[in-house]
Amino acid sequence: MSKLTAGTANRKPFKRPMAGWYKRDPFFVRYMWREVTALAVLLYAIVLMVGVLRLSQGEAAFNGWLAALGSPLSIVFHLVLLVAMVYHVYTWFEVMPKTMPLLYAGGKRVADATIMRGGIVAAIVTNLALLALVWGMRP
Amino acid sequence: MSDTQQKRIKIEVLRYRPEQDKEPVWQSFDVPYTDDMSVLQGVQYIKDELDGSLSFRWSCRMAICGSCGMMIDGKPKLSCKTFLRDYAGQTLRVEALAHFPIERDLVVGLEDFMDKLESIKPYIVPKEARTLAQGEYLQTPAERDQYEQFSSCINCTLCYAACPQYGMDSKFMGPGVLALLHRYNADSRDGAQAERMEIVGAEEGVWNCTAVAYCSEVCPKGVDPAKAVNLNKVNSAKAYFFGLPGKKEAAK
Amino acid sequence: MDTFHADVAIIGAGGAGLRAAIAIAAEHPQLKIALISKVYPMRSHTVAAEGGAAAVTQAHDTLDYHFNDTVGGGDWLCEQDVVEFFVAQCHEEMVQMEHWGCPWSRKEDGHVNVRAFGGMKIERTWFAADKTGFHMLHTLFQTSIQFPSIRRFDEHFCVDLMVDEGRVQGVLAIDIASGRFTLIQAKAVVIATGGAGRVFRENTNGGIVTGDGMALAYRHGVPLRDMEFVQYHPTCMPGTGLLFTEACRGEGGFLLNKDGYRYLQDYGLGPATPEPRNKAMELGPRDRLSQAYWHEKQKGRTIHGRHGECVHLDLRHLGEAYLRERLPQIYELAEEYLGVDPAKECIPVLPAVHYTMGGILADGKTASSLPGLYSVGECSSVGIHGANRLGSNSLTELIVFGKVAGLEAAAFAKNHAAGNTATLQKQADAAQQRAMQLVTRSGGTEKLSTLRKEMAQTMEEGCGIYRMGTTMQATCDKVAELKQRAKSLHIGDRSKAWNTEFLLGLELQYQLDVAQAMVHSAINRKESRGSHQRLDGYEQRDDVNFLKHSLATWRGDDAPAIGYGEVKITKSPPGTRAYGAAGEKADADRKAQQQGAGHV
């Protein structure tokens, strides 16, 4: 049973405000950037959906979309998104091991860092494989 | 000691005396130190020699009692295990643990934490009965490993000071208590998993957590509360969709 | 002033206090228990105990072996009937802890593992990694939560016992957060407040180990027994005094002097074997090991360090993997506080005060001379440790006698009516005035930290590992002077909420009383026994004149009166404490003698 005494006299607990908490520690700043990268995923999804829409509207529309993608502004935009996506993937694998139970291989504990590295390697390999596939399919 | 020049460090402490202060105020102290002095020893020097009215909790000095947590240079740490030498050349700011109300100086109110700890059935509800005459329950080293790290929590509440979700909404059960809950769920001798899952699956249970994971970063004992909370999101989802193992209907 | 009505009040929520509370709550759920602690229960100093808790477990171990180890380890100053009771209860109590969830380290087959410990003939020390006290305390605290009849008063500081009609009637405590006083009326009181190691300069103890409960009982006429017996743990961190568990030696660590030589073999603990052998070398009893250190220091064979003369604890041959698995906390302590990697370098260690063998006079059922008042744990002298405690006996003591104290106090409470509340409230008011003098009087000139440091310094000088009449007398005089000067103690903080300066002042007063009992008991014991060793003509044990307990009785401002009490001998007549090869020979001789005389 916790303390329920009438001894609240003389006490005046002070609650410190949380406003701006995400700025007060570099760890929180990195966390917020991590969360922001979800927006990058959203934005790129929108770009791709527009592409699908343009495809449904005929060759001219689709080519117009492709041309827009090639503009300098678009290139910069995509580079920013790429950086965000890479950070997104990295931090995603940072969190992933936390959702898994304690794992053992050959009697020894598999460290979270190992699982994270495994995930990132798998991501890199998959992406390279996809790139190679697409590269091999270009006209 | 044959130091020709005594090393000194400026320590700024956030003071708060509820009977006289409207709000906390920083106070500066000039503290002589040696290379092996902890921040706790620095704060003790202030109380012994400079200002006897400085209040703070401490006891064991060896990072096992969990009393001496403070914000040191903006980060939640055990002051007995943090050393002044690492802050040489700067003004060191020391403040009460974040996300808790300040009662006085470096002392925070822990009633909420204690209430939460007591609410999760933090004790063995035996899966099978056994008399004392029958001796100990058998538990292999592998079974023990499943919960040991979560049983190493010293209740220092650094993880609560690290958790912005708890800071914004103190209804959240919080990392330390959820780690203790998992400690019991994962103990092969315990049979109360189903009852504890109600707490896990509640809004203020694991679902308030957004995997900031700063809690595990600051934990001085390697408990990894972020893991305890987040693996239970999977357990909670399983319980919701498939029911708990052995239970006929799905848990809410 | 608030008044809370309980059946039993327990002061101290460490291992002993929690076990007592659980015992009452489980057996008598209708009784109201007030569990009072000046810190949250998980901060109690039980948390810092590392090595383990002893209980006869292995098939080739016997209660007689544990009994003989304990009585011999205590240099025959133990109450042997109490030791017989104790060793017979250990195993069941340890199984109870396991049933409550304590994460004991296990063997591959799932049974609890046991390890070797100092002064123990057969391995019988149960352990939970190298954090046994931590795990026991948290198990007990968390188990206690399931009993609604245990009402906790966390962070409540006790300032006095209430006594009326010739028996104890409750406790006056301060709610630290608000500074308000609360009268907790109870028909029985259990004191479980721990030891008093902080009266010494270098000690393994946490800040809270200030002898509060000892002083409370003492000031109400209960004698403190065997206070001169203070244990120096041989392997502590220089400077801070933090503990490096005996388990380091149980796992095979060596103690080396500056020449890299295992010096213990020169002190009747040899021969030195590469593998640890029970009751030999580094697994000898703590008093012998600390004394050997002292001799090495006199010979100039210790290593000079920043914080004093050290010896080396060598764990290198155990290897990093083994160390990280079996002694993880030790590894961390060495690395973080000393910058030493124990797998590669030796750890500098020296003896520091660790345990108070003496305490509140208690019979085998933990009862004191004041009806209704019981004591258990390090604050108590129930009679099992004698002149020197064996490692891993005290954690088991908490749970064996915690249960006894709880049940005895409950029985007393059930057999007695509640006291007169109005009378007790007046008593409480007067006690509150007395305590508040520290912050209400003016003109104080003495600084708290100065008095505390002078006390700690003089106790180290007079009541060290080896003692002399001249230095003990100087300490007696100094403590008397400090008690006088403490009347002019200046407490600058006059606030109510969380005034820790005020509490430190109250603790200083407790400590000075307890320190005075220690040194006066010491100077009057004109022999050497166990951890009380003299160099001034009294180097030998004197069973003729001093096979008896010291009893210190409070005399207010004056020095305590020192009297003596009988030692209960049952199965083990006083013999020689022999360890190492000499010990094995003594055991063989004794066995042959018993077989010759027809005993098994």
Image: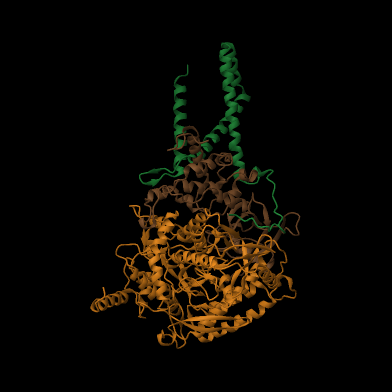
In this image, C139 relative to C512: left or right? left
Q: Is residue C271 left or right of residue B45?
A: left
Q: How far across and how far down the image is residue C419, in percent? A: 62, 69
Where is the N terminus of chain C found, in terms of image quarters?
bottom right
Say whether residue C343 is visible. Answer: no
Instruction: Using the rendered view, name the quadrant where residue C221 is placed.
Output: bottom right
Image coords of residue C559 (percent x, y) = 59, 83
| Chain letter of the green region | A
Say if residue A60 shows up in the picture: yes
Q: Residue at x 48, y 40 (%)?
A: A97
Residue B29 picture location, percent across and down: 69, 62
Q: Which image quadrant: the C terminus of chain C?
A: bottom left
Q: Nearer the viewer, residue C3 or C294?
A: C3
Compared to A12, does C418 lie above or below? Answer: below
Residue C337 position (above or below residue B192): below
Q: Nearer the viewer, residue C419 or C206?
A: C419
Dividing the picture into quarters, in which one does residue C254 lie? bottom left
Residue C2 located left or right of residue B162: right
Q: Position of residue C474 (x, y in %)?
A: 57, 84
- The foreground one among A71 and C391 is C391
Color encoding of the figure = by chain
Q: Is residue C347 above or below residue C587?
A: above
**Chain coloured orange:** C
Chain identifier, colour brown: B
**Residue C235's quadrant in the figure?**
bottom left
Question: Which is more toward the observer, A71 or A65?
Answer: A65
